Image (tube, grey):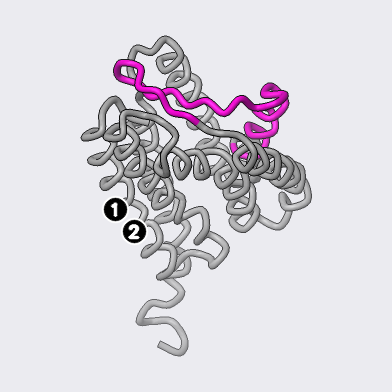
Amino acid sequence: MCWSATADLVAGAGIAAVGVACVTRAARGARPGDLPLAALPLLLGAHQIIEAQVWRDEGGTGPATVAWAVIAMPLLALWMPVAVLGAAPRSARRRLLIPLAAGIATAAALSYSLATRTVTAEIRGHTVGYSLGLPQPELIVAGYLVATIGSLLLSGDRGLVLFGVLVAVGAAVCVALWQREYISTWCAFAAVCSVVLYFWVRRRSRPARRRSGPGSPGA
């Protein structure tokens, strides 16, 4: 979420561009299991671009609002633990089944709510408020946090753990500003996270690129 349609559109395009760089870099040298996580900025960029349309629609319950909610709620709840599981070292995969299970359950609950309820968006100054009327919201939010941030913190990869700490702190700040309806800074936060993720992908791709260099066997 950003503070205007223009900000959402510009941020979305920039984040998506970082996503293309991440995927390209991962495809050339990182491990195959890193690709879903490398593609995360593409998803976040699309999310921001969709919200630009929500601004233009002045909120409401239209297709852009529904698409925004599908990405933000069930898709990310499942995408994150699956992506982290693919990128994590083998030693961490057993414990990552916990956030994966939380993600599956949370995504199922959110998908059911989106299928049976109406999600609405409301422009509130420099923020957009979304409402779905979730049953037991505290339980769903807890499952969402375990699936998304919890998977990063349990990943066993130092870079992803630090990334998880950044996500936790940054999300808390963004939520505090958004709840006060002061300004929505999620897009800036998503941009920072995408750049951090790019450097993680670049670091992961270096060993593989060295092995496939001109002096390596079979070159």
Report whether residue 154 is seen. no
Report whether residue 211 is seen. yes
Residue annotated with mark 1:
17
Answer whether labels 1 and 2 touch (C-beta < 8 Å).
yes
23 relative to 145 in the view: left or right: left
For this orientation, the residue located farthest to the top is: 180
Q: Quadrant of residue 118?
A: top right
Q: Total marks drawn?
A: 2
Percent from the top left, x then y, of residue 99?
71, 42
Amino acid under label 2? Val
Percent from the top left, x then y, of residue 44?
41, 44
Q: Could you say whether the residue bearing mark 1 is in a helix, strand or loop?
A: helix
User: Which residue is at a point 43% across and 82% down the rendered structure image?
Assistant: 216
If the image is split into quadrants, where does the N terminus sit?
A: top left
User: Which residue is at a point 42% across and 44% down the rendered structure image?
Assistant: 63
Q: Is residue 137 magenta?
A: yes
